[in-house]
Image (cartoon, rainbow, N blue to C red):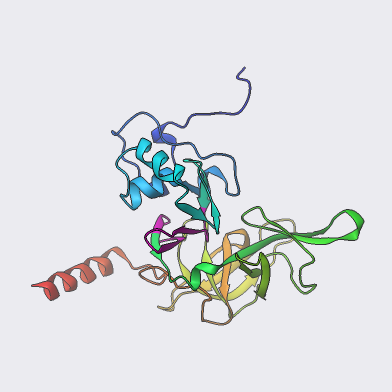
Amino acid sequence: MPRGPKKHLKRLAAPSSWMLDKLSGTYAPRPSPGPHRLRESLPLTIFLRNRLKYALTGREVTLILAQRLIKVDGKVRTDTTYPTGFQDVVSIEKSGEHFRLLYDVKGRFTIHRITPEEATYKLLKVKRIAVGARSVPYIVTHDGRTIRYPDPLIRANDTVRFDLEQNKITDFVKFDTGNICMITGGRNMGRAGVIVHRERHIGGFDIVHVKDSLDRTFATRITNIFILGQGSKPWISLPKGKGTKLTISEERDLRRRQRAAEQ
């Protein structure tokens, strides 16, 4: 029997959202234990080398991080396999760049550049609320944070707006019909839309029906829903496509129109 935690990850077993090719080696960077699950995270190595192309090799990523140039959620991170995840803000102050990790409509992590103003906060989904020692109420969020003394109106599945500089909740939005959301798991991962209806299933998974900007409806489990803002206006900027999934033929027509416009 193996003893202790696993330390390796084969390249073929890596999540498809990382978009790694098969033939560039046997192994992939295994994310360190951290705020996001292995299959819902993106190690800093892949972000800097494969996505931004700021490094050619893993060794160059180590050298960049050792200079303390990369901040995740306002804190310097030097671990090459630190797991960044949904809604995390990656800042490179030397070049003045800020990125928020979001999914595209195909369920892959996308490079989404944001303004310095938007980089000062992030949205957190409330996983559960509880009362700790000495009757201190607290909430646990999707990225592993424990926040004490939250607003008494906050419930599980709500979204809070968290100021990264002051480490405080500045606002929150309820899980309710009519609010815009993004899907963070399942077949519709990365799609955005407005909540239409919630089916309650006692002893099972609640199902939520969502309608996107093209009036197409789809359904997913409540655990996959992440509220982005009040009404149809999100609190953060969305990546290219605004979370609207096109059919294969619509994508083809869009590419043809773009090609024709270039010529």
Residue found at x 31% / y 40%: 21
Q: Which image quadrant: the N terminus? A: top right
Residue at image coords 50%, 48%: 41
Report x, y in % for residue 211: 49, 75
Position in image of residue 136 (x %, y %): 86, 60
Residue at x 32%, y 45% (from the top left corner): 55
Any part of residue 106 in sight: no
Residue reaching furthest to the right? 134
The quarter of the image holding the C terminus is: bottom left
The answer to whether residue 86 is magenta is yes
**Residue that protrudes farthest toward the left in the picture:** 263
Q: Position of residue 188 (x, y in %)?
A: 46, 61
- Judge whether residue 256 is colored magenta: no
Q: Height in image: 157 above or below 134?
A: below
The one of 120 and 124 positioned closer to us in this rendering: 120
Q: How many marks?
A: 0
Does residue 134 appear to the left or right of 84 in the view shown? right
| Span of residues in magenta | 85-110
**Percent x, y for residue 154?**
74, 71
Residue 180 picture quarter: bottom right
Viewed as shown, does residue 123 lie left or right of 169?
left
Residues 7 and 263: in front is 7
Q: Please tell me which residue lies in front, 42 or 23.
A: 42
Regarding residue 207, the answer to whether it shows in the image is yes
Left or right of 198? Residue 25 is left
Q: Is residue 136 above or below residue 22?
A: below
